[in-house]
Image (cartoon, rainbow, N blue to C red):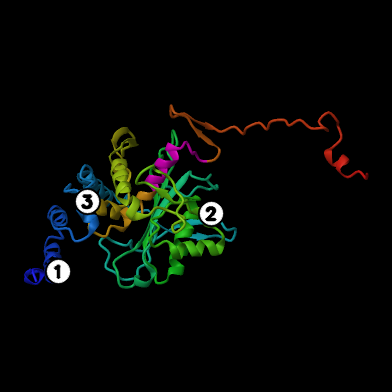
Amino acid sequence: DFLNKVTIHQADWEHNLKILLEDRERVKNDNILSQQESVQYPIDPEEVFLSAEISPFVNVIEDAKKHREYLLQSGKWDRRRSLFKDNQGKITADISTKPLVEFPFNGDNQDAPYLILEDIPDFKPPKYMYVASADFYKQETATTTNSVCTVGVYKYPLAGDINSKKLVATYAGRPKTYKELNERVLMLLQAYNAILLPENEDLGVFQTYLEGLRLEEDFLEKHIDFNSALAYSDNPARKWGYTPKQSKRKLIAMYANYLEESVTIINDKGEEVNTKRIYTIDDIWLLSEIISFSENGNFDRISGHIGAIGLLHVLEKNYIYPKGLLRKRDGEQTEEKPKKKEKKLSFYGNTSRQKSFYGNRRR
């Protein structure tokens, strides 16, 4: 009888959610207010742990604006290229005048050229000399969302190389078919022999494509957990790449640190100057995403680049170098000498005859 007298008030969640979403829509163009709305009125469990910090890229936003303006005024942003294979199977680049996919994206299917910021090598680079990351989109919603596929290729930190640890190539596009997209991405990876550590949430179609060609072991990097040990991990469901729920927040922080790094570059006067790494990012639309970044936005280029920097960190942490190169602690780079094979004792070791001579004798 006592429980029958208890009045239970039920929240009108549908109405309240509508108000919260309207409030977010109202401030979506203001990064600070948008972030505050998510922190103060979370509607997703992950939002409970959001920081009130404006942006992880706050220390490079003004630099990104300056560099983007410089690229536009100087014309140095324009390294648009199309890639194709010649009759000998060699990948070659041609100048392209097709438009790049802009940010924010309008949602229509649009193929686009690559940005080739470092010329394609005329030899097959050793494994890990170039690493890449990518963010794919869901196939079933490709025509109804504002997502694009993005790929970023970065170079291993080689001593004395002007492009060391630099962004060397990018792709952002959404062709009409996934077959075309798979071919575009694979062409870029093959051009640099780049190892790919992608966000694996929507990797399935590209993974199946590589498996059909028996190339998954050649171009996909095994699953890495960046949330704790920064190490390779066994994940039966997600064998390759990184899992966004597990690692994305950490990777964004690592990418922000990367952009703030001090680096020596050659300016337009031919002088060596020390500056932030952000001034080596020559993709104007990636810079736009860095400038506009917020926790709740759709920033495909950032998602498609952070894995490459994470992979470089893991390689260096575990002393994994491009095959044939040895990177010493003092920065000096030398050729790695092949190890001498140890001599094994053998019954036939003191004879001049070949082992096969004895193996073929009749008993």
Determine which of the numbered discs, if any, sits on residue 217 in the image.
Answer: 2
Q: Compare residues 3 and 206 and report the one nearer the observer.
A: 3
Badge 3 is on which residue?
A: 49
Residue 335 sits in quarter = top right
Q: Residues within 10 Å of mark 2 (few under 14, many from 20)?
A: few
Is residue 319 found inside the magenta-colored segment of the image?
yes
Q: Which span is picked out in magenta? A: 308-322
Query: What's the residue type where badge 1 is placed?
Result: Trp
Q: Residues within 10 Å of mark 3 (few under 14, many from 20)?
A: few
Residue at position x 34%, y 37% in the image: 266
Residue at position x 20%, y 54% in the image: 48
Q: Residues within 10 Å of mark 1 (few under 14, many from 20)?
A: few
Tag 3 and tag 1, C-beta contact below 8 Å:
no
Tag 1 and tag 2, C-beta contact below 8 Å:
no
Determine which of the numbered discs, if any, sits on residue 227 in the image.
Answer: none
3 or 1: tag closer to the N-terminus: 1
